[in-house]
């Protein structure tokens, strides 16, 4: 046991002396590639479920599979828009009369200009349709619809420092920062393609041009 401790102390002292010498020379100690490999791996694994959500809902949205695809929707016609302040009472009354489930959150919130209650999974909204008809729309979404709305940063939010967030937003922001770290760690692990640097810059340039052209022709 004493021998093991002695070896450990010697190693620690050697590292300390080496670090001190680097500091005196004005050099900061380099972060080893092993650290970047672990960072890349662990972040990739942690954010893999989120990446799949963004990939699936993003592609689905492009192909016009929106949040109400496959949802259970009930429409109840109304004579006119209710007076401001009476929306909650009217919605609860209509839900009870039609034997529909009462949302857990019965506070009235404005969603796209429509008085609504509930959450992204199950909610009721008073909507004025394009033909001028006023309806109470009760929507119960499936998992895809809920995840798509999370992707679009819709959901039950709370205020922090003047900004409104929901818990999914914090994961989304972390994922955004991690994407930058993925590229940084990837470049460090490969020493920025040391043997094929010219080709690498060519590929980078091609990607930049392709992105600019895609944005230009999509406007």
Image (cartoon, rainbow, N blue to C red):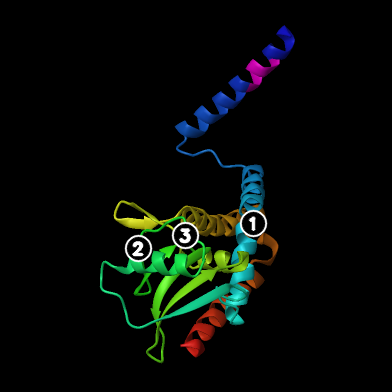
Dot 2 or dot 3, earlier in sequence: 3
Are discs 3 and 1 less than 8 Å apart at CB?
A: no
Residue 145 appears left or right of 159: right
Residue at the image position 30 percent from the left and 51 percent from the top: 161
Disc 3 crowd rating (10 Å Cα; few below 14, some 14-19, many 20+) is: some
Separation (CA) of disc 2 from disc 1: 32 Å
Determine the image quadrant of residue 16: top right
Q: Residues within 10 Å of mark 1 (few under 14, many from 20)?
A: few
Closer-to-camera residue (2/52): 52
**Mark 3 lies on residue:** 103
Tag 1 or tag 2, which sits nearer the N-term? 1
| Nearer the observer, 216 or 75 | 75
- Residue drawn at x 62%, y 74% as measured from the top left: 70
- Please tell me which of labels 3 and 1 falls first in the chain: 1
Residue 115 placement (x, y as % from top left): 35, 70
Q: Which mark is residue 202?
A: none
Coordinates of residue 21 in the picture (x, y in percent): 51, 29
State which region is magenta.
7-11
Q: Position of residue 97 (x, y in %)?
A: 46, 68
Q: Nearer the viewer, mark 3 or mark 1?
A: 3
Q: Main secondary structure of the magenta part?
A: helix
Q: Which residue is mark 2?
A: 108
Residue 49: mark in rendering: 1
């Amino acid at each position: 046991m004493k021998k093991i401790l002695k070896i450990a102390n010697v190693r620690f002292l050697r590292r300390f002396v080496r670090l001190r010498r680097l500091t005196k020379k004005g050099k900061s100690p380099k972060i080893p590639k092993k650290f970047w490999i672990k960072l890349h791996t662990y972040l990739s694994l942690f954010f893999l479920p989120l990446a799949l959500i963004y990939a699936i809902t993003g592609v689905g949205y492009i192909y016009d599979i929106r949040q109400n695809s496959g949802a259970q929707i009930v429409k109840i016609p109304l004579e006119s828009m209710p007076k401001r302040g009476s929306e909650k009472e009217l919605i609860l009354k209509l839900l009870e009369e039609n034997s529909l489930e009462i949302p857990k959150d019965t506070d009235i919130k404005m969603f796209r200009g429509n008085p609504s209650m509930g959450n992204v999974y199950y909610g009721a909204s008073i909507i004025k349709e394009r033909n001028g008809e006023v309806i109470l729309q009760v929507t119960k979404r499936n998992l895809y619809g809920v995840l798509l709305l999370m992707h679009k940063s819709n959901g039950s939010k709370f205020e922090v420092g003047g900004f409104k967030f929901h818990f999914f937003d914090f994961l989304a922001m972390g994922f955004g920062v991690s994407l930058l770290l993925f590229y940084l760690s990837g470049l460090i692990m490969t020493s920025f393609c040391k043997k094929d640097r010219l080709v690498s810059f060519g590929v980078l340039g091609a990607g930049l041009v392709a992105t600019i052209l895609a944005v230009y022709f999509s406007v």
